[in-house]
Image (cartoon, rainbow, N blue to C red):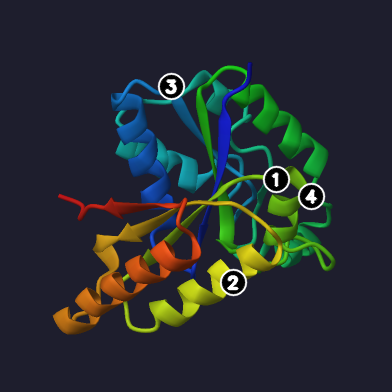
Amino acid sequence: MTGSVYFISGIDTGIGKTYTTGYLAKLWNEQGQKTITQKLIQTGNTDISEDIEQHREIMGMGWFPEDETKLTMPEIFSYPASPHLASKIDGREIDFEKIADATQQLAETYDVVLLEGAGGLMVPLTTSLLSIDYVAQKKLPVILVSSGRLGSINHTILSLEALKSRGLELYALAYNLNDESQDELISKDTAEFLKHYLVKHFPNSAWIDIPVIC
């Protein structure tokens, strides 16, 4: 029996996807679900994924054996850009079979694998494959990270509609309280609007508050 794999995506760059991934892994481990994180494709690094490092720091569990063997970071490119451009600059193609095999190995050992994507759902992994296409191929349920920043209602609904148009499952909307608008009225209204939208259009999906970093 293999564990559940959830794809973590965000409505925008800098929305708190990495923090959310680490926080959920810490929370679920504390609740008794053996959970590990994985980075789909890391750019802007060499040898070690800085996102995985941040996950481990948040989780407070140290380095995993699967980090040493690179199962949690199967593809790393040096240039800090979208994967399709980073792979072009490094002069090698993304090995999707290697990524999928690594995810499968993790799922055979852990109850939950949180697979953090690169950017948002429409980020190109290659010139002909978007992140959402990979999610659709693997039939992965999605945890979408949003927040109360100005503009997030629009970005969130666009992402949700993209999932719906491809018949993909939204497991949860993770609302990052670390990325609120400076205007309290905007933050409060954004949360209320998105909760109502979720109930109406994605009634089987969860709402998860991601607390402020202490």
Using the numbered discs, state the Cα–Cα distance from disc 1 to disc 2 in whole angstroms.
17 Å
> What's the amino acid at mark 2?
Glu
Left or right of 67 in this view: 140: right
Classify 10 Å Cα crowding around label 2: few (below 14), some (14-19), many (20 and above): few
**Front label number (2 vs 4):** 2
- Nearer to me, 63 or 102: 102
Classify 10 Å Cα crowding around label 1: few (below 14), some (14-19), many (20 and above): some
Reading the image, the residue beneath label 2 is 161
Reading the image, the residue beneath label 4 is 94
Q: Could one spot residue 97 in this view of the protein? A: yes
First reached walking from the N terminus: tag 2 or tag 4: 4
Reading the image, the residue beneath label 3 is 34
Name the residue at 72% across, 66% down: 124
Reading the image, the residue beneath label 1 is 139
Asked if marks 1 and 2 touch (Cβ < 8 Å), the reply is no
Q: Position of residue 195 (x, y in %)?
A: 33, 66
Using the numbered discs, state the Cα–Cα distance from disc 2 to disc 4 in whole angstroms.
28 Å
Name the residue at 28% across, 54% down: 209
Asked if marks 2 and 4 touch (Cβ < 8 Å), the reply is no
Using the numbered discs, state the Cα–Cα distance from disc 1 to disc 4 in whole angstroms.
20 Å
Name the residue at 29% across, 52% down: 210
**Front label number (1 vs 4):** 1
> What's the amino acid at mark 3?
Lys
Left or right of 76 in this view: 194: left
Q: Position of residue 37 (x, y in %)?
A: 50, 36
